Amino acid sequence: MTSPDASLNGQLPAMAGTKAGLTTGPGLAPVALRLAPPEQAGEEARLAVEQSLVTALNTSIALPTEPIAVGARWRTERVISAAATVTQTIDARLSAWDGNRLTIQFSAEETPVNSVFAIPGGNDTLTISRFSSEGGGTVEVDLTRGLPVGGELTYTGARELVGADPSRPLVQKTGLTVTWR
């Protein structure tokens, strides 16, 4: 993991050797993540790694619990609670299956559950007046590991947030790229 923030990037090597555990539910859907970083790891690096992993896991694709074959299509929905709570809808297709490895192509869309945007680090909120987020990609999942072992996904979007003065909205362009190796 690297960061464009030089200060944070210098702290990340101390995270080497971090132990992690992942609990999955039906269809290999992530349920809980546990991290045990080395003692010398700084708080900022710990939080950055944790947030990166949580974000990546929030883009994971749950598998059907019924038997499937190459060409199968399925849709999953989940609610992701963050600054803006969203419903994420994923349309997936199994494009290849080799031994324990599945290749899945997918598209995704996120829609806000309500108009509340909680400002991180405090109790203040803004109102979401416009929102878009969509993406897709291809991931390779190893059924024995529970995590993707290859692939890339990209999400793009934007949101308009309104505070006390509706004539001065805040417009944010959003984006996320996750590469699994």
Image (cartoon, rainbow, N blue to C red):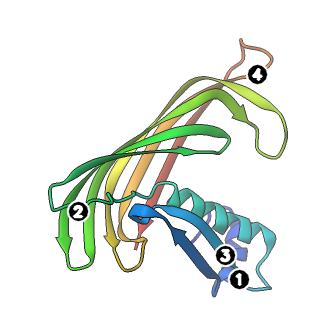
Q: Position of residue 120 (x, y in %)?
A: 76, 44
Q: In this view of the protein, which residue sits in the foreground, 100 or 43?
A: 100
User: Do callouts 4 and 3 mark residues in contact (Cβ within 8 Å)?
Assistant: no
Residue for point 76% across, 80% down? 41
In front: label 3 or label 1: 3
Label 2 – label 4 distance at C-alpha: 49 Å
Residue type at tag 2: Pro
> Which of disc 4 and disc 2 is earlier in sequence?
2
In the rendered structure, which disc, 2 or 1, sits on the residue that comes first in sequence? Answer: 1
The image quadrant that residue 124 belongs to is top right
What residue did someone put label 2 on? 67
Query: Residue 121: where, in percent of width, then height?
Result: 82, 46
Q: Which residue is tagged 1?
A: 14
Q: Residues within 10 Å of mark 2 (few under 14, many from 20)?
A: few
Residue at label 3? 35
Amino acid carrying mark 3 in the image? Leu
Looking at this view, is 84 or 23 the one in front?
23
As drawn, 72 above or below 31: above
Q: Outermost residue toward the right? A: 123
Taking the image as shown, residue 31 lies to the left or right of residue 74, namely: right
